[in-house]
Image: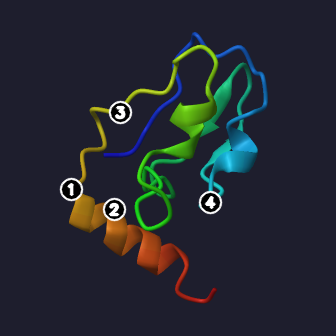
């Protein structure tokens, strides 16, 4: 399951540089997570790093993008195949 950023985001800028998949970017009003790039840090860390650093707890799982651990790992491998 990809993650999402809710309206509680305070645009503190701490999440974006933590993402190993470059899935987080500044949106019109708050930061956004690209579900096609988000792997919840599977393949890199035990916990999503954006969630770990978020001071307002505004990064839940996105119920519209459910994925298994194996699917997230396959996505991570596909995204970083050329690394």
Q: Residue at x 43, y 38 (%)?
A: 3
Q: Residue at x 41, y 53 (%)?
A: 46
Report the Cα–Cα distance between label 4 and label 1. Answer: 19 Å
Q: Is residue 17 above or below residue 28?
A: below
Report the Cα–Cα distance between label 2 and label 4. Answer: 13 Å
Observer-nearest of 48 and 7: 48
Observer-nearest of 51 and 79: 51
Give the crowd class for mark 1: few <14, some 14-19, many >=20 residues within 10 Å. Answer: few
Whether pointer 4 and pointer 1 mark residues with C-beta atoms closer than 8 Å, the reply is no
Work out whether mark 3 precedes mark 1 in sequence or the reverse, and give the earlier one: 3
Report the Cα–Cα distance between label 1 and label 2. Answer: 6 Å
Apparent side of residue 31 relative to residue 71 in the rendered image (left or right): right
Report the Cα–Cα distance between label 4 and label 3. Answer: 17 Å
- Quadrant containing the C terminus is bottom right
Q: Which residue is mark 1?
A: 68
Residue 55 in the image: state x and y as whole percent: 64, 18
Query: Which mark, by number, is residue 61?
Result: 3
Q: Residue at x 48, y 52 (%)?
A: 38
Work out whether mark 2 precedes mark 4 in sequence or the reverse, and give the earlier one: 4
Q: Which residue is mark 2?
A: 72
Report the Cα–Cα distance between label 3 and label 1. Answer: 12 Å
């Amino acid at each position: 399951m990809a993650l999402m950023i809710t309206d509680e985001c305070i645009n503190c800028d701490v999440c974006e540089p933590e993402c190993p998949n470059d899935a987080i970017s500044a949106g019109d009003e708050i930061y956004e997570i690209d579900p096609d790039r988000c792997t919840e840090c599977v393949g890199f860390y035990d916990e999503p790093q954006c969630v770990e650093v978020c001071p307002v707890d505004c990064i839940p799982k996105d119920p519209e993008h459910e994925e298994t651990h194996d699917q997230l790992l396959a996505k991570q491998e596909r995204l970083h195949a050329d690394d």
